[in-house]
Image: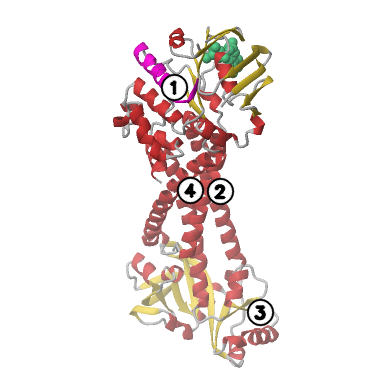
């Protein structure tokens, strides 16, 4: 282990360049995955709050477009095994002076999922604000939404960034603002094992509607797939950039150290030994770059989370799974990027050490 | 190890630089290859030492040709040492670590360094010692696995006369203990130390002195 560290220290400048290029790529992978994962997980946990089953308009691409009739909740709530049905209207609108804010119309029975930090739950003509927007707007008495004034009844705290930066109001008011009866219903069940039967029952009641388990919905939700795919594509590009950085720097390193590898070949060290030597050097850089990138990413996410500008909407999560995955990615980045230059190094002909021509 | 070159010719492109060389290097002998610049010393040495394949003819090591020797890395490590004009010590390793990199038996390192008079320089790096000391460390690296034969191309090309003669002395004393040396050099003074002198001219062996 000592030898590769000595080699790295000797080639300090190029080691630093490889380290920087790896750290930037790894941090980019961390951030894009954490942020997209955060969006998905925030939205998922919102739907999963008292939502074992979700009901939407059939075939919609985005819950924002979903429009279903609220009166059906009465019928649904009578199905055996259903504990509670809540309605939600999901929308977004400008709230002076903010250009766009998430608006959540929720049925009264869902208010209890918001923990109040100030005032009371909203009555008709009133709204309650998430703590983030409450602070941003400096504890307003009223807000203006869709050309109407709403009194602010109170403020709540939610660990879901979307909600914390959003406005919650009753279903009737939200229905008027967004011209719909309901976007989705969320059902909590007494007995999860009955969910298939309940789903079948709901789908029978109204063919315009579609019920799914919330987990199933999240898995198949197109918007999440788009977010995930885009983040994978950007992550893959960062990975490629990282590899290219390593390949080009390592090629220069190998070129600088031709004599060293030639002499290793001449004293009979095998090609494999030389390849392993170079791989262990970049692996050491990779591990350090990974650690630094992880720290930097956590710091950046913390900054973003508390930046007023983002209203808590960007809420990156670095889960243990993500850490492990990115670690694997970092290691493979180092290995793949080093392999070609290392193979080249292992094939340097000791003949090149003998001066041609000369005396 | 007895090395035998039979009808060796070598071309670089269309240029023929070795024109039929037949020589035998006896085990443990100190052989000097001398001649003018361009006479083919380096090419011959490279061919004898497994680094270069001759265009025509063959080289046998105790009767075996290269392809019969098995893994070439193992063969070099066990039987052959190299010393080049430049020391090629690895700059981020100490002199002792440079020697240890090649060593199959680490217990031999310290006695050998003592033998070469560099025992006190083990912790130094190549840029912290003199040219003569560097070349001694490179020679130690070549000798560490007790090779049958050490090949050296212009090993004194970068040394002053005093250090150069010191290197020839070393070769001579190690060859008395059984290590063969094949040294290509344009320095005629090597003739005073070698057992056999092969004189090259224009790609052929002009004369062999004993
Ligand atoms: N790699 C090479 N490619 C082409 N010509 C070479 C090469 N190496 C040596 N030569 C030529 O071969 C001839 C013999 O060179 P060399 O064996 O190095 O002789 P010496 O070591 O006696 O100076 C010279 O004319 C030299 O220019
Ligand atoms: Mg030469």
Q: How many marks?
A: 4
Sequence-earlier tag: 2 or 4 = 4
Where is mark 3, residue-wise? A209
Question: Which callout, 4 or 3, points to the residue nearer the camera?
Answer: 4
Task: Estimate how packed mark 4 is, as few (under 14), some (14 to 19) or many (20 or more) residues with alpha carbons within 10 Å.
Answer: many
* Residue A16 coordinates in the image, percent (x, y): 40, 40
Instruction: Let me know if residue B93 appears in the view.
Output: no
Question: SS of the residue at dot 2?
Answer: helix
Asked whether the residues under the numbered discs 2 and 4 touch, taking CB atoms below 8 Å apart as contact, a structural biologist would say: no
Q: Quadrant of the N terminus of chain B?
A: top right
Query: Would you say the magenta stretch is mainly helix, strand or loop?
Result: helix
Q: Compared with residue A145, is residue A336 higher up or lower down, i.e. above or below?
A: above
Q: Ligand 1 is in which quadrant of the figure?
A: top right
Instruction: Let me know if residue A353 appears in the view.
Output: yes
Where is mark 2, residue-wise? A237
Asked whether the residues under the numbered discs 4 and 3 touch, taking CB atoms below 8 Å apart as contact, a structural biologist would say: no
Residue A5 shown left or right of residue B180 in the figure: left
Q: Residue at x 43, y 36 (%)?
A: A14
Disc 4: host chain: A
* Residue A286 coordinates in the image, percent (x, y): 45, 48
Q: Nearer the viewer, residue B202 or A156?
A: B202
Q: Compared with residue A175, is residue B190 higher up or lower down, i.e. above or below?
A: above
Q: Nearer the viewer, residue A153 or A192?
A: A192
Magenta part of the protein: which range?
A: B161-181
B169 is within the stretch colored magenta: yes
Q: Nearer the viewer, residue B53 or B171?
A: B171
Task: Estimate how packed mark 3 is, as few (under 14), some (14 to 19) or many (20 or more) residues with alpha carbons within 10 Å.
Answer: many
């Amino acid at each position: 282990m000592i030898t590769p560290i000595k080699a790295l220290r000797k080639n300090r400048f190029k080691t630093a360049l490889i380290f920087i290029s790896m750290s930037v790529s790894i941090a980019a992978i961390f951030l894009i995955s954490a942020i997209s994962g955060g969006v998905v997980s925030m939205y998922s946990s919102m739907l999963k709050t008292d939502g074992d089953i979700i009901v939407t308009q059939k075939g919609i691409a985005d819950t924002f477009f979903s429009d279903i009739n609220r009166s059906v909740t009465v019928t649904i709530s009578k199905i055996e095994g259903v504990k509670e049905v809540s309605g939600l209207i999901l929308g977004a609108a400008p709230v002076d002076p903010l250009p766009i804010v998430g608006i959540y119309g929720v049925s009264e029975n869902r208010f209890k999922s918001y923990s109040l930090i100030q005032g009371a739950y909203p009555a008709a003509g009133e709204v309650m604000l998430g703590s983030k927007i409450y602070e941003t707007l400096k504890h307003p008495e009223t807000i203006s939404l869709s050309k109407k004034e709403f009194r602010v009844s109170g403020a709540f705290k939610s660990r879901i960034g979307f909600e914390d930066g959003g406005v919650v109001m009753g279903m009737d008011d939200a229905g008027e603002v967004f011209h719909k009866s309901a976007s989705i219903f969320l059902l909590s069940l007494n007995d999860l094992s009955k969910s298939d039967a309940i789903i079948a029952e709901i789908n029978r009641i109204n063919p315009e509607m579609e019920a799914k388990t919330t987990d199933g919905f999240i898995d198949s939700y197109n918007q999440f797939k788009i977010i995930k795919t885009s983040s994978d594509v950007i992550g893959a590009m960062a990975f490629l950039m990282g590899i290219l950085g390593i390949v080009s720097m390592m090629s220069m390193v190998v070129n600088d150290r031709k004599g060293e590898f030639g002499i290793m070949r001449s004293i009979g060290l095998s090609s494999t030994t030389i390849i392993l030597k170079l791989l262990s050097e970049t692996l050491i850089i990779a591990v350090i770059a990974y650690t630094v990138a992880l720290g930097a990413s956590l710091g950046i996410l913390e900054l973003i989370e508390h930046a007023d500008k983002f209203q808590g909407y960007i809420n990156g999560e670095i889960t243990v799974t993500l850490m492990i995955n990115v670690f694997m990615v970092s290691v493979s980045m180092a290995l793949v990027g080093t392999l070609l230059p290392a193979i080249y190094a292992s094939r340097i002909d000791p003949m090149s050490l003998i001066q041609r021509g000369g005396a | 190890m007895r090395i035998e070159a039979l009808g060796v010719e070598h071309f670089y492109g269309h240029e023929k630089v070795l024109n039929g060389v037949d020589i035998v290097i006896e085990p443990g002998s100190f052989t000097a290859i001398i001649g003018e610049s361009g006479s083919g010393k380096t090419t011959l040495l490279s061919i004898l030492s497994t680094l270069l394949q001759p265009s025509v003819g063959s080289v046998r090591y105790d009767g075996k040709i290269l392809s019969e020797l098995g893994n070439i890395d193992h063969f070099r490590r066990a039987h052959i040492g190299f010393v080049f004009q430049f020391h090629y010590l690895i700059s981020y390793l100490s002199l002792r670590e440079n020697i240890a990199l090649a060593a199959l038996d680490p217990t031999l390192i310290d006695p050998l360094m003592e033998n070469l008079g560099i025992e006190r320089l083990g912790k130094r790096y190549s840029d912290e010692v003199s040219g003569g000391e560097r070349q001694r460390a490179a020679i130690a690296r070549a000798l560490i696995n007790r090779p049958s034969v050490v090949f050296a191309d212009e090993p004194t090309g970068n040394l002053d006369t005093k250090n150069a003669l010191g290197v020839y002395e070393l070769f001579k004393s190690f060859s008395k203990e059984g290590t063969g040396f094949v040294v290509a050099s344009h320095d005629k003074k090597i003739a005073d130390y070698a057992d056999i002198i092969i004189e090259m001219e224009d790609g052929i062996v002009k004369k062999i002195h004993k």
